[in-house]
Amino acid sequence: MAKAPFVVVGNSAAGLNACEALRRCDQATPLILVSEEPTAAYSRVATPYYLCGEIGDATLFFKDDAYYERLGITRRFGERVTAVDPSRHRLTVEDGEELTYDKLLLATGSTPHRPPIAGLDATEVLPHWTLAHAQAIRERSREVSSAAVLGAGFISLLTINAMWKLKPSIRFTVVELQPQVMPNLLDPPAAAMLRRRMEASGITVRTGMEAVAVSQQQGRKLVHLKDGSRLDVEMIVLGAGVRPNIDFLHGSGIACQRGILVDERMQTNQPDVYAAGDCAEGFDFLSGERVVHAIWPTAVEQGRIAGVNMAGGSARYPGSLSMNVLDAFGLTLTSIGIFSERPGVEMYSFTSANGDVYRKIALRDGCLVGMIAAGGPEEARSMGVVQQLIRRRLEIHRWKEALLRNPGIYGRICQESQQGPGLGRPPTATASASRRGPV
């Protein structure tokens, strides 16, 4: 009897890296890739740049027909999985057809969160997460002169920045429930820098404010706010974050909390079923707590680990790190790991004399566990090295002042650490950084 195929559900970072890992280990077993979206793989994180016209199809789509053919992938694109039955090793697609699998990877990604706002389902509200969403926002933006954006998180800021580049004349009002923009990814000083840049670009920002209802009449959209005021606009963009695509797993026996629960092998509680990427709830590298990190690097690595293990390997994932880079309104902002105050963590910060650069590092037991930087494009160049320093748990306490003043020495620390604990003498910092901690 022929061996049942590997089946991967999801045609993005996690799914594709799993397919590549599977093929490196096993060239013979049939491989089926199922995707709800009908197109070849594209970079979801690049859709804002597509929206504003900075890139075209050639850059956005990073896989072509030859790629799938080279890996021997049978494509089932434009098909949505509606159920999984681990006891029978089968999954069901939307038209009722069942597919049998030997090993199954769920890399179904995430979908825009729809908060409990009255009238949301009866009003034209545009989210931004897929290529189709970006295309819809682009077309609508060309027709309007005013827009309300509900939410000021990472996705919202990317969308606003893209729309602003596409048509700067649009009058934007951003409504955010939390007291700052990007509340989950920036601390208050960095968020204040971003807000100032947004307001200098003509964008109205209303933090600490809740949208309680939306409605539409005669082509206009109304956003009713908790303080009794309302916004009268031509377009509403929804940016309230994303949630894992796991609704189709009800009744499957696959354990889920916020996402699909996985162990360090990316395996679920059901035999031969794995999960990776935005839909997977694994472990945080620093805290050991269960988290969903809906970011591209995590999806890439989790997908690779899952693919190796589906093919019979024994790879382990050490845990994910929250890591984000945002270029918006002439400001580059980065954050990684821990950056909010908590017991046992020391915080050190630096602000340039003109206020154009802000940096903060977090240390625990002398080891780097987090960083925020805001300023020019150079602030993002050390992110890869910073991630290495965190994962390698290097003791860098004596370098803290120099790190804040000159991020370029991250690489030097990482390089010299290969020689053992005797790191070279840190450069002398010309000014003191402020210290907060331990807290």
Image (cartoon, helix red, strand yellow):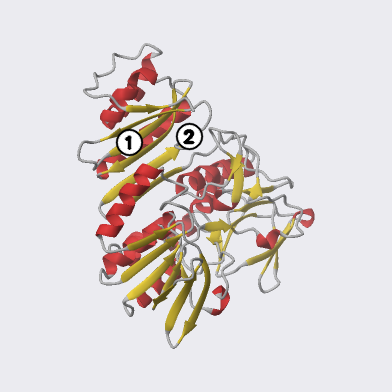
Residue lying at the far front of the rendered structure: 228
Q: Residues within 10 Å of mark 2 (few under 14, many from 20)?
A: some
**Residue under the point 68% across and 62% down:** 248
Residue lying at the far right of the rendered structure: 87
- Identify the residue position indicated by label 2 in the image: 341
Q: Nearer the viewer, mark 1 or mark 2?
A: 2
Q: Nearer the viewer, residue 205 or 33?
A: 205
Amino acid identity at mark 1: Arg
Q: Quadrant of residue 244?
A: bottom right
> Is residue 53 among the parts visible in the rendering?
no
Residue 14 relative to residue 388: left or right: right
Indicate the quadrant containing the N terminus: top left, top right, bottom left or bottom right.
bottom right
Amino acid identity at mark 2: Glu
> Is residue 283 among the parts visible in the rendering?
yes
- Identify the residue position indicated by label 1 in the image: 359
Q: Nearer the viewer, residue 1 or 150?
A: 150
Q: Residues within 10 Å of mark 1 (few under 14, many from 20)?
A: many
Q: Quadrant of residue 389?
A: top left
Where is residue 138? Give x, y as percent: 36, 72
Task: Please determine whether, in this image, residue 59 is positioned above or below residue 297.
Answer: below
Q: Quadrant of residue 230?
A: bottom left
Marks 1/2 in contact by CB < 8 Å: the verdict is no
Where is residue 157? Give x, y as percent: 38, 58
Residue 270 relative to residue 325: left or right: right
**Residue under the point 41% across and 53% down:** 181
Q: Which mark is first along the chain, 2 or 1?
A: 2
Residue 176 numbered mark, or none: none
